[in-house]
Image: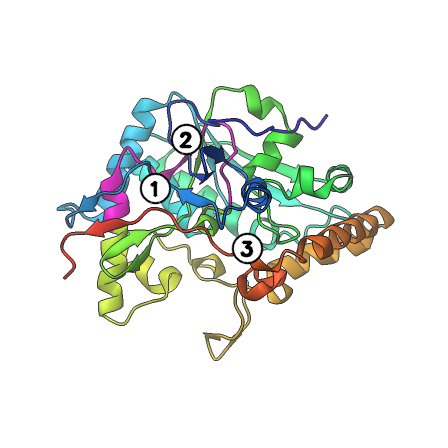
């Protein structure tokens, strides 16, 4: 039975989870925050990752040295860790940092989505790309055995969520139809809500502008309500890691390297994957250059996942209900980039942190 996670003040005890603020209210749902602002004449909710603004000198250690040190601290402070592992550069970097620190996670978790029927061709990153084989090789290299658990979101789950799309499916995620995060898995598999494991996610690349760094909420995939969730690269317990990431982005920009996935992460020491997950495969390219970005009508992954709905009558009904709700949501044009729901919500910008060694 699906057990919804209701809004609460602190999804992770004794931890500063990213959140929105409007007046004196705290929100972990972007949709809830936007609705509150509209109802209370607030222009826009504030977004906060850390509860402070600070200044950071360039760390003496390298980014990767700090990542391994953070992984060692993570393992010391948490008895059991579940790493949400997509197989992409971020989650794989967290895994390798934990393995190098001698603090392997207890479980690796990944999810698949099936709107209409089980089909091993639509969840490309899990079932088509050699993610499982590469993972097995990695674990063998370190001499460890960690279970990989796959959490499936099935057609009947989608149908249940679409009985109330706004209150159930879209409340803690982006407005892209099939996008999701571990909150959904914790609802469909409620035993996850009550086990003792700390959930760990990667993601959240900082933005560097004018000698400061900050984050946008979309970089977290709006994953703010997963119980016992910590975000590895933005964890306030090791801020030097985020600072090193920001300085690395700045240094690469000075060299003309601006592609985070292909260039910056290589310079910082992210372990290579050797497959299309090393780069943003989901957007169409011509001669290696992106031609469309951040419009889910052109996102290859989104198109594949949506096409699965047409494999059953149940899936078609799910898609119809989803499209109807999104058409209503789209009327709130000021919430979306260029007034267009297909380009997702306008991003929430976090507090800014000064980079002392940038003139």
Measuring from the top left, give residue 222's x and y in whole percent: 51, 44
Residue reaching furthest bottom?
287
Q: Which residue, given by chain and number where applicable, does mark 1 sit on?
A: 234
Upstream in the sequence, badge 1 or badge 3? 1
**Does 90 sit left or right of 38 as displayed?**
left
Instruction: Please tell me which residue lies in front, 104 or 40.
Output: 40
Residue reaching furthest front?
41
What is the span of residues highlighted in magenta in the rendered image? 222-244
Upstream in the sequence, badge 3 or badge 2? 2
Evaluate whether residue 96 shows in this view. Answer: no
Distance between mark 1 and mark 2 Cα atoms? 19 Å
Distance between mark 1 and mark 3 Cα atoms? 22 Å
**Image quarter in which the N terminus is found:** top right
**Residue 254: which quarter of the image?**
bottom left
Q: Which residue, given by chain and number where applicable, does mark 2 sit on?
A: 105
Element under disc 3: loop
């Amino acid at each position: 039975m699906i057990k919804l996670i209701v809004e609460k003040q602190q999804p992770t005890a004794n931890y500063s989870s990213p959140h929105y603020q409007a007046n004196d209210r705290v929100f972990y749902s972007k949709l809830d925050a936007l609705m509150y602002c509209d109802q209370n004449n607030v222009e826009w909710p504030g977004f906060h990752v850390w509860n402070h603004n600070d200044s950071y000198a360039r760390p003496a250690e390298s980014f990767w040295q700090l990542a391994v040190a953070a992984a060692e601290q993570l393992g010391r402070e948490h008895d059991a860790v579940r790493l949400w592992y997509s197989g992409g550069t971020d989650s794989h970097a967290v895994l390798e940092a934990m393995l190098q620190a001698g603090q392997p996670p207890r479980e690796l978790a990944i999810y698949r989505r099936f709107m209409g029927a089980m089909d091993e061709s639509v969840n490309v990153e899990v079932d088509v790309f050699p993610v499982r084989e590469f993972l097995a090789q990695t674990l063998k290299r370190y001499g460890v055995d960690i279970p990989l658990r796959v959490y499936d979101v099935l057609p009947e789950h989608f149908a249940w969520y679409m009985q109330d799309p706004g209150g159930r499916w879209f409340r803690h995620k982006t407005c892209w139809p099939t996008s999701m995060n571990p909150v959904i898995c914790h609802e469909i598999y409620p035993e996850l809500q009550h086990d003792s494991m700390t959930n760990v996610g990667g993601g959240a690349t900082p933005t560097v502008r004018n000698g400061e760094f900050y984050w946008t909420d979309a970089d977290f995939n709006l994953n703010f309500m997963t119980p016992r969730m910590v975000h590895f690269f933005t964890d306030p317990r090791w801020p030097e890691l985020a600072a090193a990431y920001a300085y690395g982005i700045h240094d690469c920009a000075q060299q003309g390297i601006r592609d985070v996935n292909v260039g910056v992460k290589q310079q910082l020491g992210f372990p290579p994957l050797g497959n299309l997950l090393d780069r943003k495969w989901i957007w169409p390219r011509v001669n290696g250059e992106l031609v469309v970005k951040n419009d889910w009508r052109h996102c290859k992954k989104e198109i594949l996942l949506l096409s699965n709905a047409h494999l059953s009558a149940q899936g078609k009904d799910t898609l119809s209900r989803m499209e109807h709700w999104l058409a209503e949501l789209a009327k709130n044009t000021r919430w979306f980039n260029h007034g267009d729901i297909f380009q997702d919500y306008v991003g929430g910008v976090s507090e800014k942190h000064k980079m002392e060694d940038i003139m």
